[in-house]
Amino acid sequence: MSQSQGEAREAPDTAGRPKRPMLAGVEVREADLESTPGLHAATVVIRVASGVVLLLALFQFIEFWRDPPPGGVGVGLLVGDTIRLIVFSALLWAGAELASIMIKSHYDLRATRILVARQTYMMRQMGIASGELPPDDPPVGQRRAEDAT
């Protein structure tokens, strides 16, 4: 997995501050990192199930032609059942791809949340510096703590 898709590394310890994780070369808060091991595991399980169903369809087809019933009975049933299993296998694979897309969109949403929070902070600091905002408002993190109590 690449650095931009959610892999976090520890930032170097500077000036006695606790280590903070790095995401795409930028320090982030621990709360901004949410792992998705459940979706990764579901993706792997669904893809394995898709492969098993596809193999079963192929083995069924091979076994039918290796030892066919007398008179060619059941060819229509074989073709129909094999196609149904192949389509089911493809749908399982598509479900695994949807889980993968959910993981990637989660990374994008998390990065957007971090970016918007940083932009808001910078705009507030610029407003305070220009005198358009009063400096006596508590910082955003402290406001949240006061609202919760």
Image (cartoon, rainbow, N blue to C red):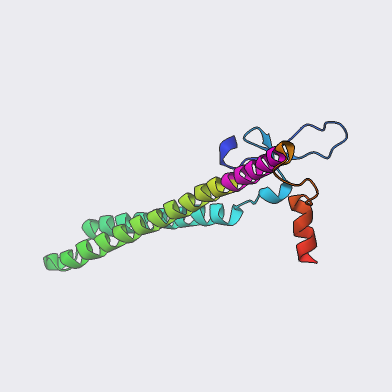
Residue 19: quarter of image: top right
Q: Quadrant of the C terminus?
A: bottom right
Residue 24 is a magenta residue: no
Q: Is residue 145 left or right of residue 84?
A: right
Q: Count how many numbered circles sit on residues in the image.
A: 0
Does any portion of residue 9 appear in the rendered image? no
Towards the viewer: 138 or 149: 138
Which residue, as the protein is rendered here, is positioned at the far front? Answer: 131
Q: Position of residue 40 (x, y in %)?
A: 55, 52
Work out which quarter of the rendered image holds the N terminus and state it.
top right
Image: 11 above or below 92 = above
In the image, 75 versus 37, the foreground residue is 37
The answer to whether residue 109 shows anywhere in this view is: yes
Above or below residue 130? Residue 30 is: below
User: Which x, y percent locates residue 38?
Assistant: 58, 57
Residue at (65%, 45%) from the top-left corner? Answer: 120
Stretch of the chain drawn in magenta: 111-127
Q: Is residue 13 above or below residue 84?
A: above
x, y percentage for residue 51?
40, 53
State the image coordinates of residue 63 (x, y, percent, origin top left).
Answer: 28, 58
In the figure, is residue 44 to the left or right of 71?
A: right
The answer to which image quadrant residue 41 occupies is bottom right
